[in-house]
Image (tube, helix red, strand yellow):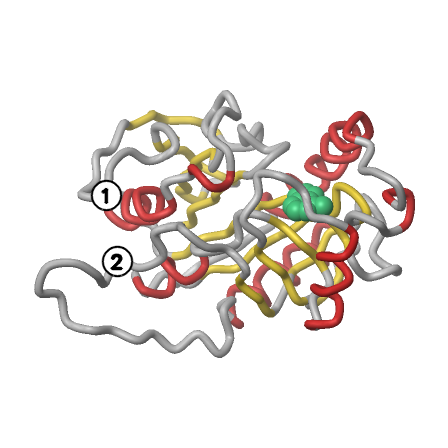
Amino acid sequence: MLAIIGGSGLTQLANLAVERREVVRTPYGEPSGPLTFGRLCSQPAIFIARHGYGHTIPPHEVNYCANLWALKQAGATCIVSIASVGSIRADLNPGAIIIPHQIIDYTWGRKSTFHEGGNTPVVHIDFTQPYDSELRLVLLEAAREAGQAVVDGSVYAATPGPRLETAAEINRLERDGADIVGMTGMPEAALARELELPYAAITVVANHAAGRGDSKLSIQFARLEDILRESMEQVRRIIEMICIEGK
Ligand code: HPA
């Protein structure tokens, strides 16, 4: 069953025919909110709002472990993350929709593994390809069917937040090879891998990253909401086309 983790700008999925909501407890504490079960174009699906349904949980306070655990317990077999990002690369403008293929993790202080504490054995997951390649292809195909242009591949830099970056930090991320920057991609992707849940992301560029394009001097928050509102409509159309038969 497909699970969707909605980010900023997508706290509800209008195209999900809601059947029930369920509060789930996990050994890792409370998820960001109840899980919403429903049907997405006749397929069963689960939705959770990463920042809570009232958008009150900042990136560094999201209980990523509880969210992933709850989704797995509820029967999710793959996870599609929706997230907004800042663009570092000059050719990626606000509104662009990107299916990233790589991650660089700059976050710290977040619980980032299920395998710690007590007498649990040491586990090292393979994370060479952080996003599931088959699920990425499903998303690219869904975008094609929806007639929605998307960028195939980019390197996602996960920063701690909640503050945005300095211009010098963005220059450093670019030197490191990052194309886009967001605050929630990690440890979410790694935790999904630990639970053997295929995971891929649809990211929406909300703004030029600090010091770039029209964010040269500062980031204009007023414009972000409008951009996200429009682009999330396009993301919804892509989500409607996701076909995960057999997954
Ligand atoms: N930086 C980090 N996270 C973000 C940004 C950004 O510029 N835009 C949206 N999420």
In the rendered image of this protein, does residue 164 appear above or below residue 99?
above
Q: Quadrant of residue 192?
A: bottom left
Identify the disc placed on residue 176: none
- Report if the CB atoms under discs 1 and 2 are less than 8 Å apart: yes
Please report the residue visible at 77 percent of the width from the left and 53 percent of the height from the top: 87
Say whether residue 216 is left or right of residue 242. right
Mark 1 nearby-residue class (10 Å; few <14, some 14–19, many ≥20): some
Please report the residue visible at 78 percent of the width from the left and 58 percent of the height from the top: 88
Identify the disc placed on residue 28: 1
Circle 1 sits in a helix, a strand or a loop, which is it? loop
Say whether residue 132 is left or right of residue 149. left
Circle 2 sits in a helix, a strand or a loop, which is it? loop
Identify the disc placed on residue 114: 2
Cα–Cα gap, marks 1 and 2: 9 Å
**At label 2, which amino acid type do we have?**
Phe
**At label 1, which amino acid type do we have?**
Tyr
Camera sees residue 147? no
Say whether residue 165 is left or right of residue 119. right
Say whether residue 73 is left or right of residue 159. left
In the rendered image of this protein, does residue 1 appear above or below residue 236?
below
Q: Position of residue 126 (x, y in %)?
A: 39, 78
Please tell me which residue lies in front, 25 or 58: 58
Q: Quadrant of residue 8?
A: top right
Q: Position of residue 46 (x, y in %)?
A: 40, 39
Camera sees residue 135? yes
